[in-house]
Structures are given as structure tokens and as C-alpha cells.
Amino acid sequence: MPDDELPEGRDLPERDASAGPATANRKTATGPGRVLVTVYAIFALAATSRAGVQIATKFHEAPLAYVLSAFSAVVYVLATFALARAGRAWWRVAVVACTVEFLGVLTIGTFSVFDPAAFPQATVWSVYGRGYLFIPLVLPVIGLFWLRRTARS
Amino acid sequence: MITGFSAAVAVSSVIVAGWSFVLAARGREPQRSLLAGLAVVEALLVAQLVIGVVLLISGRHPGSLATYLAYLVGSLVVLPAGTVWALAERSRSSTVVLGIACVAIPVMVLRLYEVWSGTHA
């Protein structure tokens, strides 16, 4: 087979020669991290659009649920940007965002199971993200795991 | 929406997604042919936007207009943004990034279809 079967430098950690000393630490947006950022970005888009439509068209129907919907959108956008950037400060923001996201999906998931009346319309976090294949439940765990790994490097 | 066309968009996107994952499993960076595949899917999404707007102008309306427009326009953003992100650091992961962007498309097309047929159901 030709050489292009295995392109040089497909393993990322060694490959990132462009990183300067300031950003060499805590790079979350490299290698598999880029895949994570992609998934986060898709959820940021989904949550933002959903919250935008809900608030613009029927805010009066369930103000609390829609405010929480908007809050989840902010958390996803923040997590996406923080994971996409290098450096300690962004790394910390990402940890906070992923933690809040995890607590949010657990809290809202639990409330939506036990008090469905309070959440007449689904948010991304309703029933632990069932409408999104439970990805919202798994994503912050993977995010925090990835942040722990990048902290060591 | 036209059922056949929506299905074609979704299926073509799934095929390109599968192609991406196969390439990624073989350790490849994104190639020109894969990007051409993405361009085809994006072209179909643009056609979907045109069809969607024409249907609206011709007087038919979806269950929720705002949601419908959000999906119609939102689905156009995913592949170009995913491609820019993937090519900014070329690696095997970039190929996975393209695959994941392609996976999001059939989900959005399905939701778009559901929102559209909300009135007719």
C-alpha cells in the first residue's frame, strides 16, 4: 500500500509543533479534543436555536422552562468556546461550564421526570436529554475527563 | 416538504458520514474527494432551503414557522463550519469531525420534516 495510507503525524500530541510556550499547556482543542468541540458546537447550535424559538414565540407558556432552556444554551456556547481555546484561563472556564452542564442535566432531568407539569415543552436537558439520545448526559462526563487529561500534559 | 427529497438529503449525508468514519478508522486526513462529497450534501441543503421557501411562498405553512426556518437555515451552517474547524488542524480527528457534522444533518432534516408535516398530520 502507498505511504498515504498512514499520513505522517496522525498522532496528535507530538504533532503540535506550532504551540508556543504560553499555549503549550492545557491545550484542549487538539486531537480528539477537536471532535469534542464539534459535538459541543452542535449542541450549542441546537440549544441556542431551540431557546431562541421558544422565547421568541411562546415565552408566556412556560417562562421558567424557557429561561432554563436559554441557560443551557449559554452553558453550551461557553463550553464550546472554552474547549476550543488554549491556556489556563479557558481551561478553568471549560471545567466550570462542563460541571454546571452536568449538574444542570441531572437537576433538570430529575425535575422533568418528577414534575413534568413544570416542563410542558422539552428543553435539551429534559429527562436527562432523552430527546437527544442522552448525549447531554454523557457529554459533560467526557468533557471533564478530557479536561483532566489535558491538565496533566 | 417533499418526502423523497428530504430522504435523499438525509441518506446522502449518512453516506458521507460513513465514508468519513471509514477513512478516519484507516488513519486518514480529510481528502479532496471527501470534501467534494460534503459539497454535494451542502448543495442539496441549499436546494432544500430553496424548496422550503418556495413552499412557504406558495401558501403552505408548517406547524411552527419559527422552528421550521431555524432548522432550514441552521442546517446550512453545520457543514461549512465543521469543514473550517476540521481543516484548521488536519489529522485523523479532522476526518471524524467531518463525519460528526454529517451525522447532525439527517437529524436536522428529520426534525425539519416533522415540523413541516405538523400541520398536515
Image (cartoon, coloured by chain):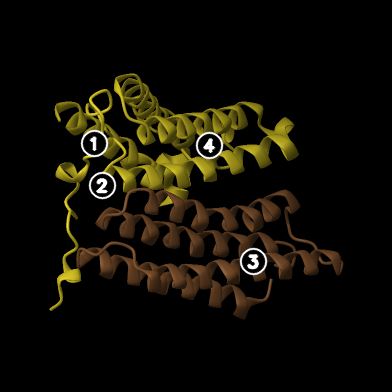
Chain colours: A yellow, B brown
- Respond whether the residues carrying marks 4 and 2 are from the same subunit: yes
Q: Secondary structure at mark 3?
A: helix
Which chain is mark 4 on? A
* Picture quadrant of residue A20: top left
Q: Position of residue B114 (x, y in %)?
A: 62, 63
- Respond whether the residues carrying marks 3 and 1 are from the same subunit: no
Q: Amino acid at mark 1?
A: Trp
Q: Nearer the viewer, residue B43 or A18?
A: A18
3 vs 4, front mark: 3
Residue at x 24%, y 65% (from the top left corner): B28
Which of the two discs, 4 and 2, labels the residue nearer the N terminus? 2
Q: CA distance from mark 3 to mark 1?
A: 36 Å
Instruction: Find disc 1 in the rendering and name its residue.
Output: A146
Q: Amino acid at mark 2?
A: Pro
Instruction: Find disc 2 in the rendering and name its residue.
Output: A32
Instruction: Find disc 4 in the rendering and name its residue.
Output: A116
- Tags 3 and 1 touching, CB below 8 Å: no
Instruction: Decide: few, some or many residues near mark 3? Use Cα within 10 Å; few <14, some 14-19, many ≥20.
Output: some
Q: Quadrant of the C terminus of chain B?
A: bottom right
3 vs 1, front mark: 3
Residue at x 61%, y 26% (from the top left corner): A64
Instruction: Decide: few, some or many residues near mark 4? Use Cα within 10 Å; few <14, some 14-19, many ≥20.
Output: some
Instruction: Decide: few, some or many residues near mark 2? Use Cα within 10 Å; few <14, some 14-19, many ≥20.
Output: some
Q: Secondary structure at mark 1?
A: helix
Instruction: Decide: few, some or many residues near mark 1? Use Cα within 10 Å; few <14, some 14-19, many ≥20.
Output: some
Q: Which mark is residue A22?
A: none
Which chain is mark 1 on? A
Q: Nearer the viewer, residue A145 or B67?
A: A145
Q: CA distance from mark 3 to mark 4?
A: 38 Å
